[in-house]
Structure formats: C-alpha cells, structure tokens
Image (cartoon, rainbow, N blue to C red):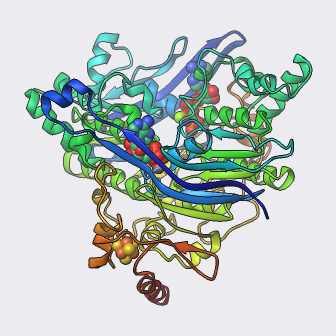
Amino acid sequence: MSEPVTSPVLDVRGLCVEFPGRHGTVAALSDVSLSIRPGEILGVVGESGAGKSMTGLAVQGLLEPPGRISGGEVWLSGRRIDQLSDKDMQSVRGRQIGAIFQDPLTSLNPLFTVGAQLVETIRLHLKLSKQGAKDRAIHLLKEVGIPAPEARFDHYPHQFSGGMRQRVVIALALAAEPKLIIADEPTTALDVSIQAQITSLLRRLCDDHGTSVMLVTHDMGVIAETADRVAVMYAGRLVEIGPVEEVLRNARHPYTRGLMGSIPALGRRVERLNQIDGSMPRLNAIPRGCAFNPRCPEAGRRCREDRPEPTPVGHGVSACWLNAGGVL
Amino acid sequence: MSDALTVNDLTCNFDVSAPWLNRVLERKPRQFVRAVDDISFTVPMGGCLSLVGESGCGKSTVARLVTGLYRASEGEVRFAPGRSGEPLSAQMIFQDPFASLNPRWRVKNIIAEPLRELKLRNSDAEVMERVGELLRIVGLAPSDGSKFPHEFSGGQRQRISIARALAGEPEFLVCDEPTSALDVSVQAQILNLMRKLQDEMGLTYLFISHDMSVVRHMSDRIAVMYLGRIVEEADTETLFANPRHPYTRLLLETIPDIAEPKRHRSITASEVPSPLNPPSGCTFHPRCPLADGRCKSERPAMRNFADGSRAACHRVEEAAVATAKAIQAA
Ligand SMILES: Nc1ncnc2c1ncn2[C@@H]1O[C@H](COP(=O)(O)OP(=O)(O)OP(=O)(O)O)[C@@H](O)[C@H]1O
Ligand SMILES: Nc1ncnc2c1ncn2[C@@H]1O[C@H](COP(=O)(O)OP(=O)(O)OP(=O)(O)O)[C@@H](O)[C@H]1O
Ligand code: SF4
Ligand SMILES: [Mg+2]
Ligand SMILES: [Mg+2]
C-alpha cells in the first residue's frame, strides 16, 4: 500500500459467526472484512436480517450463546481482541468501545433515574468527583438535545418519549470518551432535526477527537450526510464497500442499486414503491454461488455456481461477477 | 364519508414529580408534563391521518390515549360503530418492537394470541395455518414461528409485531413508527401491504412517523404537532405544497435529501423547549422567525381555511407571503 499508513482503529479480518441449532449450524456471518481509520465514519447498510447488528455484537464479544466466532480476527488499535477473556473484554467495552444498541431498553435500567445511570458509567471509567460526573452527565444530555437537562436528570426512563430514550442511550455510549463508537440504528426513532443534531455530534467527535464510528443504519439519507465510507451487507456477507459518494451515485453491486431504488422519493407520490422482489434468503438456505443471484436482474450462469470474492473496483470493493470478469 | 374516530379536546398530564420525601428535603415543587394539550381531530372511515412532529411532542401519547392504554386527563375519544355494530376496535403497532413482544413465547404463539382470543379460527390447525400466512405476508417464513423473539434481528421483530397486529383483523390500526426499524426495501413491502389492506378491507389508520416521505406516501391528511398541540392540519398534498404554519415550514425544510446531502439545514434543535416548562403564548415563538409581541403573550386560536386546512398561528398571512417568496426563489 502506498497510501500514508494510519493504522486503523478497528480492523476486522475474515470474520465468521455461526449459530449451532437443532437443524444444523447456520453461518450468520461469512468472511466479513472491514476497517475503520481514526476519525472515520463507516456506514453499514443492508436489508433487515443481513447481519449488521451481528457484526457489531461480534466485534464487542457480545454474541448470544450458542452463537460464536468461528473464524477470522478482530483488532482494536493494534490489539487482537476476539480472544480476550470476558473480564478483559468488559473493560474494553465502555472504555474503548462505546455501544449504542438497536434496542434502547437493553442499555437502560428502568429502576434508576437517567442521571444516576449516567453518573455511574462516567465514574466507572473516568476519574471525576461526584459533582464533576453530574456536570458531565448534564452536559451530555444537553449535547444529545434533551430539553431542560437539569430537570430530566432526575427522571426515570419510562418518563421519556421513545426518541428521548434513544438519545439518553447515545449519551451513555459517549460518557467514557471511547475511541470507537458502534452505533446501531442510533437515529431510527428520531425526527430529522434531532437526527441532524446527533449526526453532527458524531461528526464533531470524529473531527475533533479522532473518534471512529461504525454507523449501522438503514437510512440512506443519514448515510449520505454523515458517513465517509459505506459497507453494504447481504445474507451475512459483505457485498460492497467504498467511499460514500461512489456507492450512492455509482453503485457497483446490483443489490446496492436495488436498495437505492426502493427509497420513497420525496418529490412525488407513487401508487406503489419499488421493491426488490423476493426476500433475502434464510440463513439456512443461502443459495450456491452469489447469495443474491435469485433476485438479481443481471445474474448469469457463473453467479449460480461460484461465489464471487470481494474484488477491488474504483476506490472500493465489490463482490459481484460483473466486476470480476463477467457473469457468463 | 363518516368518521371512524373522533377526538375532542383531549388533554393528558403526567405527574413527573420527585418522590415526596425528596420534594420535602430538597424543596422541589411538583412537576407536570402536559404531553397532550387540548387537541381535536377526526379520522374518516377508510382514511389515513398521520401525526408528525419532533421527538417528544406527544405523538405516542396520543396513540396510547386513543387505544385506551393511557387515561385522558380531559376530553373524549369516540369510535364509530364497525362492521359488527360494536364500536371499532383499534389494534396498535408499537414504536418499540422489543418491549411489546413477550420474550418467553414462541413467535407463533405471539401471533396466534389474538386469533385465539377473538376466536377468529375454529381449530388449532386453522390458527396455525393463518399464523404461517401472516408470517409470509410480512416477509418471514412459516418455520420462523417456532423461534423466540430474541433470535430475530430488529427489523424482523418489528415485522412480527405487525403480523400480530394484523392477526386480530382490526378495522382500525394505530401505527406508531411501524417501519422505523426497517430498511428501505422491507419498508417498501410493508407500506405497499398496508395500502393494499386499506383498499381491499377498508382499514382505517392513525399513522405516526418521523419520516416525511413515508408519511406522504401513506396519508390522506396530516396533523402537525408541536409541544402537545396540533398546530396545523391539512390534506397531504396541500400541506406539502402550501405549508401554513411556520413550524410546518421548518419541518419540511429539514428533510434530508439524498440527492443533495450536505445542503444547509436551518433548524437548531438545541432550542427545542421543554414540555416541563412550555413557553407562553404560542409555544413555538422562541424558534419562530415571524414571532412578534402578540405571539409571546397570546395563545393563537385554530383557524379554518377554504381549502379545508386549519392552522393555529397569529401570523399565517405573513407566513403565506414567506412561503410564496421561498417558492419563487427556488
Ligand atoms: N440469537 C440468535 N440466534 C439465531 N439467529 C439469530 C440470533 N440473532 C440474530 N439471528 C439471525 O441472524 C441474522 C442477522 O441478524 P442481525 O440482527 O445482524 O440483522 P440486522 O442486519 O441487524 O437486521 P435489522 O436491520 O433487522 O436489525 C438474522 O437472520 C437473524 O434472524
Ligand atoms: N409515562 C410517562 N410518564 C411521564 N411522562 C411521560 C410519559 N410518557 C410520555 N411522557 C412525556 O410526554 C412527552 C411526550 O411523549 P411522547 O412519547 O408522546 O412523545 P413522541 O411524540 O411519541 O416522541 P418520540 O418521537 O420521541 O417517540 C415527553 O415529554 C415525555 O417525556
Ligand atoms: S403564532 Fe407567532 S410564534 Fe407562533 S408560529 Fe405563528 S408567527 Fe410564529
Ligand atoms: Mg439490527
Ligand atoms: Mg413516540
């Protein structure tokens, strides 16, 4: 590589995850490789069930048993973390990796006020006095756009609206100033103005503190506005990864192009939205060859037989025979 | 067309005071949130009304009041008689699909519950057949029924709760962000399905979403909420073409556009006031570019317009001029 080498904050190499089950083992992730540089936002998109959350969970060592990493490596700032003990991993989470989970309730305890939970997290990881931690907590609530943060400090999670709870979870993830933030659908329940505030907050953290973000979302608008690069997943595999303008404007993979086509256009109302016909295969029935071939308008013989490897195209990578010698 | 749902002067206050002892020791006053403040609207039979507005403005609270999950402090919610002659029964799709699915039940039993409860099928075999059908409708497989909710991804769980809501064959569906956890392609499938059910079965919707393009696709009419009040209501195309209230204009301006991603967006969300201590007069006045002295002191009344829309703003005429200018400039 001739580019100036800034070693990535997160480097995932050939990650495989499997779930042994009653009817045999299913591969939830298969050969996923991606990296995020300091100060970079990597967007992760793909249909529901594609493996986006799973990738985030595997990186943090949070797979639900019997799920397990069956191959590949995860490196965080030059240190391999996929083989750490539970105890070591626990200190990596929170301090070095801040997590925003798709389900805001998993991160919040209904029995404690939001303020108490923030203060506890802050004091666990940063050396601050009680008052210092409280000040920081209120500052964080303000940054994520909670009105009247001093009063809200004493409220319980159920007294917040859906979008406000989601923002509290974001504040919790930022509490310990982590190097890497894994944000799983952080803005789904938020209206556009708050969304813009959260995404610009993430952007600011990246620009000012060199924080890296893995931003999982299905909202292409958010991706277009915030991500530097974007990774597209399908059926547990990575199908395309590249700079955001290239992927949005000039997608190389037919699946990515289909995704772009199903976005409801603001300007006009149509009787029926475009949809990619069919649905993503179940994990136990992933077709031979390219996993997308039964739904792909361009599929040829080779697509039904051989699995396309991720191949460099333009400034990115795409796993499609169209970019690797044709579909035959 | 007759109205399926009529809501009159609905208000809902929440007591969010600290516990009694803390209040006494720390001399804190009692605190209330007026989550819904004197709102009225109707939803015509077979129609779709959407509620839009910023996070925390009271949309979910309205949904929960309508479905009877919260008790109103004041006002009434009235459903028209449905096919059976009884008042329409409303089903709800919740904003949070995680909290609304029982983690200890298999998915097939979660979906079968309304079928069994309402005795919509005679035998267990018929119930299970219908469950399989519903799973397919929302893009899952019948074999998924034997799994538990935690074995599904976020969007898959949301689809399970949609299947469950459809199982009860409701005539009125309250959808609180039904597609917010879904990617665009599954979202398109679900929205197409919901439109189809509306056409074929005359389903009526109260729809909540923060995604304006989804709202535009689904609704006949839109009510815009701000801090617990409805500030404007209009037919969908009228609202997009000719927003009357300054807040509606702001809302429409902030929609992200993939065609033009990094375009300047004027809103500053940090100014969103708190419902714990709402501003006087028109609650929008601290953020409103047109606000004058009257806006600070006097709550604007709802005004009806010839095109069937209504808005609560002292300065709608000025706002109309501003809109016309903006359209010309564009
Ligand atoms: N605990 C589990 N046991 C078995 N399979 C699971 C488990 N958790 C997730 N899966 C499966 O793994 C696949 C990937 O799930 P994942 O949660 O990563 O999807 P996702 O891309 O985040 O989708 P969404 O956008 O819907 O959240 C799904 O098909 C899901 O059914
Ligand atoms: N059970 C409750 N107890 C106390 N306060 C509540 C309760 N439920 C809602 N609130 C308050 O009422 C207001 C409106 O909340 P609501 O959930 O209706 O908002 P929303 O418009 O649905 O927002 P979002 O888009 O974030 O879901 C908020 O200020 C919230 O804190
Ligand atoms: S009443 Fe005044 S403050 Fe309120 S929206 Fe209209 S112009 Fe703005
Ligand atoms: Mg997910
Ligand atoms: Mg809500």
Q: Position of residue B166 (x, y in %)?
A: 75, 38
Q: Position of residue A68 (x, y in %)?
A: 51, 15
Q: Is residue A244 left or right of residue A80?
A: right
Q: Is residue A136 left or right of residue B34?
A: left
Q: Can residue A225 be spotted in the picture? A: yes
Q: Can residue A51 be spotted in the picture? A: no
Between A249 and B160, the residue placed more toward the observer is B160
Q: Position of residue A180 (x, y in %)?
A: 30, 36
Q: Which residue is found at the position 28% from the left and 52% from the top?
A: B277
Q: Image quadrant for the N terminus of chain A?
A: top left
Q: Is residue A278 above or below residue B309?
A: above
Q: Is residue A128 left or right of residue B239?
A: left
Between B176 and A260, the residue placed more toward the observer is B176
Ligand 1 rendered quadrant:
top right
Between A285 and B270, the residue placed more toward the observer is B270
Q: Position of residue B66 (x, y in %)?
A: 60, 45
Q: Which residue is found at the position 39% from the left and 48% from the top?
A: B34
Q: Which residue is found at the position 51% from the left and 54% from the top?
A: B210
Q: Is residue A33 above or below residue A120?
A: below
Q: Is residue B183 left or right of residue B14?
A: right
Q: Is residue A290 above or below residue B34?
A: above
